[in-house]
Image: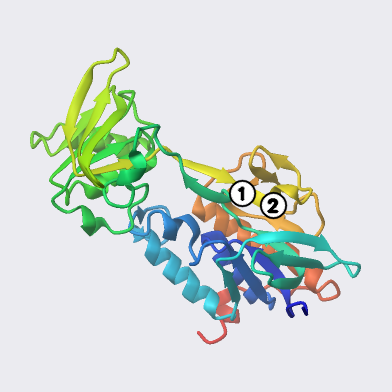
Amino acid sequence: MSQPAIHVTDVAVVGAGPTGLFAVFECGMLKMTCHVIDPLDMVGGQLSALYPEKPIYDIPGLPAIQAGDLVTNLEKQAAAFDPVYHLGERVEKLVRTDDERFLLETSKGTRIDAKAVIIAAGAGAFGPNRPPLANIEQYEGDSVFYMVSRREAFRGRRVVIAGGGDSAVDWALSLHELAEKIYVVHRRPKFRAAPESAARLKALSEDGTGKLELVVPYQLDSLEGEGSTLSAVNVKTLDGDIRRLDADVLLPFYGLATDLGPIAEWGLNLDMHHITVESGTLATNKPGIFAIGDVATYEHKLKLILCGFSEAAMAAHAVRDLVYPDEALHFEYSTSLGVPHA
């Protein structure tokens, strides 16, 4: 059986999340072509898969934008440079060739020959941390959800949100105006969310309507229901006192279990589940391989989308020196350079 054809490109971008998409744009502005590989069957990474309707407030120039809309805009921005997407595929192999290029092979047998690699894999492959509740699987997809893909689905419903981080607090605030009742279950009175968000949550719980209730300090204990339909969530204190919450929906937000997968076998310097890079170029210890976004780490790293965008720009400029080693860069701003097809 013959080998599939090899796609030749300047840059292979591993990951189609927001930083990966912006890396395509930045590479395009520097006249470099990109092929993008992602195990999800859509672009956008966690923004698309976990919370497309969640508002984001710290994108410069946009006071608020839904995560899905941000992904749509980034995809449109990158489209000017005709990237080739390989979605639903995971990079299984990466080897350095004799001519100082890279050959990548995906889980579907796709082969990509690239001068450089930018890893924008976020936290790697991800899935929810499930609470250890008996028979929780029977409710998943109908009454138990680990993400909110459509806010309207929770209108008029009794919702239990479990967790104390940003996701739990942000979704409690977002769904408050739609749900009949929201219970927020956390094992401590103090939440780990942004202080302003935690303050808004507390204010809503004290507004006298009873529509949002903080159930603290409690933790999940068991579920009640028939078939896949939930009727109640039982919670308990550390002393074992049980309380029954009438509920239609449980949203457990206990973070994600992540796995770098084959990337961990590429000989890169790792710090826990992150790739160590130089802060100025985002270069890894392997020449020609760069890492940006949540997967990259360096001193004083901030895990913000806007920082990932900056890292994408810096990595693209470092990659250009490899793709065009004999050409000096005459830097121009996009306002004077323009964008193809725009």
Q: Nearer the viewer, residue 323 or 212?
A: 212
Q: Say which label, 2 or 1, has the lower sequence index.
A: 2
Q: Dot 1 corresponds to which residue?
A: 295
Q: Is 27 situated above or below 318?
A: below
Q: Nearer the viewer, residue 49 or 211?
A: 49
Q: Which quadrant of the rendered structure holds the N terminus?
A: bottom right
- Outermost residue toward the top in this view: 239
Dot 2 amino acid type: Ile
Nearer the camera: disc 2 or disc 1: 2
Q: Dot 2 corresponds to which residue?
A: 263
Q: Is 294 situated above or below 8?
A: above
Where residue 60 appears, as percent x and y from the top left, is 44, 58
Where residue 308 appears, as percent x and y from the top left, is 56, 55
- Outermost residue toward the bottom in this view: 341
Do the numbered discs 2 and 1 sit on residues whose CB atoms are within 8 Å? yes
Residue at image position (53%, 87%) is 341
State left or right for residue 276 relative to residue 170: right
Graded by Cα atoms within 10 Å as few (under 14), some (14 to 19) or many (20 or more), the crowding at tag 2 reads some
State left or right for residue 258 relative to residue 137: right
Q: Secondary structure at mark 2?
A: helix
The span from disc 2 to disc 1 (Cα, nearest Å) is: 11 Å
